[in-house]
Amino acid sequence: MRAVVLGAAGAVGRACVAALHAQGAEVRAVGRDPQRVAAACPDAAIHPGLDLERLVAGDLPEAALRELLTGADVVVCCAGPSHRYSAAVARRVLAAGVPLVDPGGEHASDELDPLARAAGTWAVLGAGVQPGLSGLAVATAAAELGRTPEEIRGWCGGLQPLTTAGVDEYLHAATRGDRAGIRLLHHRRARMRPEHSPAPPSPFPASATAHTHLDPECEALAARAGAAHVHWLNVTEGVVTEAALRRCLSGETSAAQAIAAAETDLFGREPYFHILIEALAGEDRGWARVSCRDSYAATGAVAAACALAELPPGARLLSATDRWDALRSALLPEVSLSSGNGPNFAPTVAVEEGEL
């Protein structure tokens, strides 16, 4: 299998390249700086570069794109920020009849579906940790419940570094009219009242705090599961990072300073990221858990696993598929997926024959 990975030198892209290579794929790595790509992806074939700004502007020569896509079985777009590149890349790649995977691009799925079907090819969008595994976790928790949930509860977050593209995505989401949950959070008007926002459950540490977060994606996930109510919280330990991001929103500080703030929060600590989902109906409870050390590397691994899939024509969100069980084994050891019913978010531990 031959894959083209865009944005290969970034945190997500280089993890995707490594995961594809580990599965025996032939990878062509593409980025703005070929030397940086070569250093990040020593086992990949290095493309001399693709001008994504010209692609977004619509004046990239067809010959340049055709040369890039010749012989490709799939393109994985890890170029960031996603809100700038995903839709434009997807249109050109799908129109050429080549399958596409993108950890972002979730807002373009309705637009891209007819294009993919007309070209007889497929796309998986939102193929990462959040969005992506977060949505699969909602569906899995509802399935573990065994009946239509009355309420979905979710806790997502942890202690992670920041990247330039990540800061850009965050600020873009925070200033969009349809992302009121994030925008209110950073103006401190939406912090949950103590009686409505208990401490995040284990495995989050006692030092973590939860903030309400509700955007169209969260609402759509709950509605798809049939739940009438959703209680979704972002969890963080990054006090210095939060303050820096608030200053970024007001223009008082730069992305580089926010990245440095995240490094301060991480000093002497081990990074982690968890997604904990509960589906509730009366006294019954189903749950699903996603845990990883590095959400960027995990997103690259998810995108790589999706790139290796065989799917029918059309564009779909990863969260709208039934790939939880397939990903459970494919993502180890980068990501742990577990689910069940009962009181605890304990990870599922496989017991080998003879261990007992």
Image (cartoon, rainbow, N blue to C red):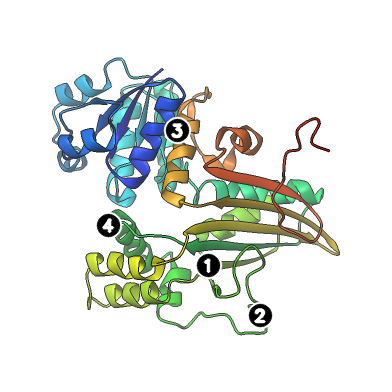
Q: Secondary structure at mark 1?
A: strand
Per the rendering, the mark at residue 164 is: 4
At 51% across and 58% down in the image, what residue appears? 272
Give the residue type that dot 3 points to: Ala
Residue 259: % across, % down:
29, 64
Residue indicated by mark 3: 304
Mark pair 2, 1: CA separation:
14 Å
Q: Report which quarter residue 169 is drawn in.
A: bottom left
Q: Earlier in the sequence, mark 4 or mark 3?
A: 4
Q: Residues within 10 Å of mark 2 (few under 14, many from 20)?
A: few
At 84% across and 38% down in the image, what residue appears? 356
Residue indicated by mark 1: 234
The answer to whether 234 appears left or right of 169 in the picture is right
Q: Nearer the viewer, residue 254 or 57?
A: 254
Give the residue type that dot 2 points to: His
Residue indicated by mark 2: 196
